[in-house]
Image (cartoon, rainbow, N blue to C red):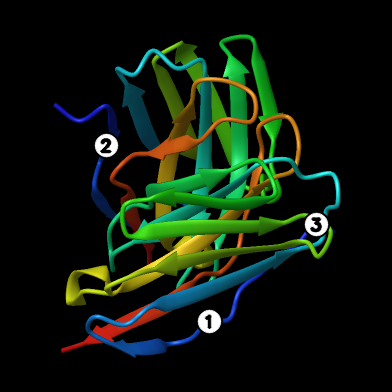
Amino acid sequence: DADVTQTPRNRITKTGKRIMLECSQTKGHDRMYWYRQDPGLGLQLIYYSFDVKDINKGEISDGYSVSRQAQAKFSLSLESAIPNQTALYFCATSAGRGLEQYFGPGTRLTVT
Amino acid sequence: QKEVEQNSGPLSVPEGAIASLNCTYSDRGSQSFFWYRQYSGKSPELIMFIYSNGDKEDGRFTAQLNKASQYVSLLIRDSQPSDSATYLCAVNVGYNKLIFGAGTRLAVHP
């Protein structure tokens, strides 16, 4: 089984709809991250969480919200989706400060 | 604004050659550096990390770090067609946050 899983893997939604992307991990890591990737661009950090009670905004948090339901689960919500949120979304985990991050398989989101 | 710069490529090398991928970063306080490989439509996969100046070797891969010049590179020896991918450089900028470059696309041709 994969250590970091994301659901759904693909999603097409309409402008204005609320959508939630979910991430679960079995690596036992305390730190979790949400990134988006647009074609030809690097990964941009949306939100990150160091534990259940610690959630922080990244570079591009506007239009997004998150929930850390448990150490192993971190969800990303788009309250009212817009077309420029069409992108590939990745969840990642890390065991601690300064250490490498491990990525889930990604969710391809299209907003029409 | 902390930045990580990479040449977008494509970098085209023949099979069996050495591929050299370069990355520069702006934050002098950065202490750890990572190289990820990403196949089209897939998630980034960690290849190497390096914390100290100098070279670090792992199989066909060598990471090189020069903090004074704010430069990190990845060498791939005996390049194979399966190495064709986009390589992302990532730099730790504190609080376990990574800043990623846009990546260099590598094409290894037979």
* Callouts 3 and 1 in the same chain: yes
The quarter of the picture where the C terminus of chain A appears is bottom left
Q: Is residue A17 visible?
A: no
* SS class, disc 2: strand
Q: Which residue is mark 1?
A: B8
Q: Amino acid at mark 2?
A: Thr
Numbered mark located on residue A7 in the image: 2
User: Going 32% across and 60% down the picture, which residue do you hit?
Assistant: B60
User: Going 33% across and 24% down the picture, which residue do you hit?
Assistant: A24
Q: Chain of mark 2?
A: A
The alpha-carbon separation of the residues under discs 1 and 2 comes to 30 Å
Q: Which residue is mark 3?
A: B2
- Estimate the x, y position of residue B24 in percent, counting from the top left: 71, 67
The quarter of the picture where the N terminus of chain A appears is top left
- Left or right: B106 in relation to B67: left
- Estimate the x, y position of residue A57 in percent, counting from the top left: 70, 36
The quarter of the picture where residue B36 lies is bottom left
User: Going 58% across and 72% down the picture, which residue do you hit?
Assistant: B22
Front residue (pair B67, B41): B67
- Estimate the x, y position of residue A22 in percent, counting from the top left: 36, 31
Numbered mark located on residue B57 in the image: none
- Label 1 vs label 2, nearer the camera: 1
- Label 2 vs label 3, nearer the camera: 3
Q: Amino acid at mark 1?
A: Ser
Crowding near pointer 2: few (<14 within 10 Å), some, many (20+)?
some
Up the image or down, B26 lies above or below B9; here it is: above
Up the image or down, A18 lies above or below A43; here it is: above
User: Going 56% across and 10% down the picture, which residue do you hit?
Assistant: A52
Q: Amino acid at mark 3?
A: Lys
- Left or right: A11 in relation to A91: left
Marks 3/1 in contact by CB < 8 Å: the verdict is no
The alpha-carbon separation of the residues under discs 3 and 1 comes to 18 Å
